[in-house]
Image (tube, coloured by chain):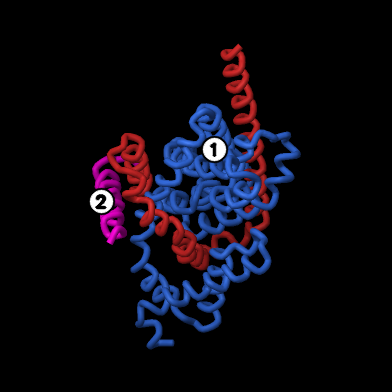
Amino acid sequence: MKILQSIDIFPVLLTLAAFRVGQLCQQKWKKPVFNPTLIAAILVIAFLLITGFETKAYNAGMGKLSWLMTPATISLAIPMYEQFQVLKKSLKAIAAGVAAGTISCMLVVFGAGALLRFEDALLLSLLPKSVTTAIGVSLSELFGGMGGVTTAAIIITGILGNMMGPALCKLFGITDEVAQGVAFGTSAHVIGTAKANEISGLTGAASSLSLVVAGLLTAVLMPVIAGLM
Amino acid sequence: MKYLSQFLRITAFTLAGELLQRVIPLPVPASVYGLTLLFAALCLGVVKLEQVKDAGGFLVSILPILFVSPAVGILENWGLIQGVVIPLLLLIALSTIVTFGIAGRVTQVLNKRGKQDEDSAKH
């Protein structure tokens, strides 16, 4: 273990292998619960706990890759631009839907979290829970939240939105394809978008656009809501 | 070599985002500045879709792998959340349902209204 802990490529290899296992599970069972990121994280955590491999050494190895996160997040502008072209006619409705959804999400988290007497650091970690991990984690850490909790909350949110989405569309009477996409993208980011893509191309496009807009809007609203604490 | 020039462009937007974050005294991640700038550049035609699409598509596709390491970070935060796991999950479920319903309903109502206006304008 000591030798492996000194080799930075080992955590990278471990993460890639764990992600590959997660991907194979998802291909086999085709359920959102088998989210490759979630499975990979569980496998890596199990490995660290069982072997006693130091978390610090794992982070040091993965840290060499973390600079990729910013350019990768910036590249979300590309699908956003493509969807923007397709959805030009519905932009106002989409903007209003994303704004209403994002504001209610943050208010519900803030209100319920305060009622449950969650600590500030926990509450701050949960506020960006409906947006894409790329933006959510940096927001959480910028405001003093915990990146690990935020990532877990974001993935669980995505899986729930993906699984409950079709039933929620019926429950709330959401029949319009664009509106369904906005619901998936605003509430359940990329993982919800996977389900939206199964419904129709238009729904998927609306979902992809909404998830980026929701991320940007959450960045704008974070200081306002955090200011209430 | 098309990837080289595409990566170069995206890296330049990343640097711009990082610089803005350091210059502007607001709690906004560098990625949000960079994303906004790249989107604006695409809309204005300063950057063409083909000039960033392949490298950008690759970067977007590896995002889920990059999230593994932050997710593993929950190990370090476990002490703070272990007592509140159930309420935490309930809060996540509740807020997801509310967000889904409100975002969908608001869009549907406005989108229908928009379509009706368009139809009545035609008649």
Q: Name the residue rendered at 50%, 67% in the picture.
A: B72
Expressed as whole percent of the image width and height from the top left, the position of residue A114 reads 59, 43
Residue A67: say if magenta: no
Q: Chain of mark 1?
A: A
Q: Is residue B18 magenta?
A: yes
The span picked out in magenta is B1-29
Check disc 1 and report its element: helix, strand or loop.
Answer: helix
Q: Residue at x 40, y 85 (%)?
A: A4
The secondary structure that dominates the magenta segment is helix
Residue A208 visible within the image:
yes
From the image, state the color of chain A.
blue
Residue B118 location in percent, x, y?
57, 18
Q: Amino acid at mark 1?
A: Thr
- Kindly identify which residue carries mark 1: A102
- Residue at the extreme top of the image, as rendered: B123
Judge left or right: residue A171 versus residue B23. Answer: right
Identify the mark at residue B12; answer none if there is no mark. Answer: 2
Relative depth, front residue between B2 and A203: B2
Mark nearer the viewer, 2 or 1: 2
Residue B103 circle label: none
The chain displayed red equals: B
Q: Is residue B79 above or below residue B32?
A: below
Using the image as rendered, state which of residue B19 and residue B44 is in the foreground: B44
Could you tell me which chain the residue with mark 2 belongs to? Answer: B
User: Could you tell me how many numbered marks the image carries?
Assistant: 2
| Cα distance in 3D space between marks 2 and 1 | 30 Å
Question: Residue flagged by tag 2: what amino acid is it?
Answer: Ala
Would you identify the image quadrant in which residue A203 lies? top right
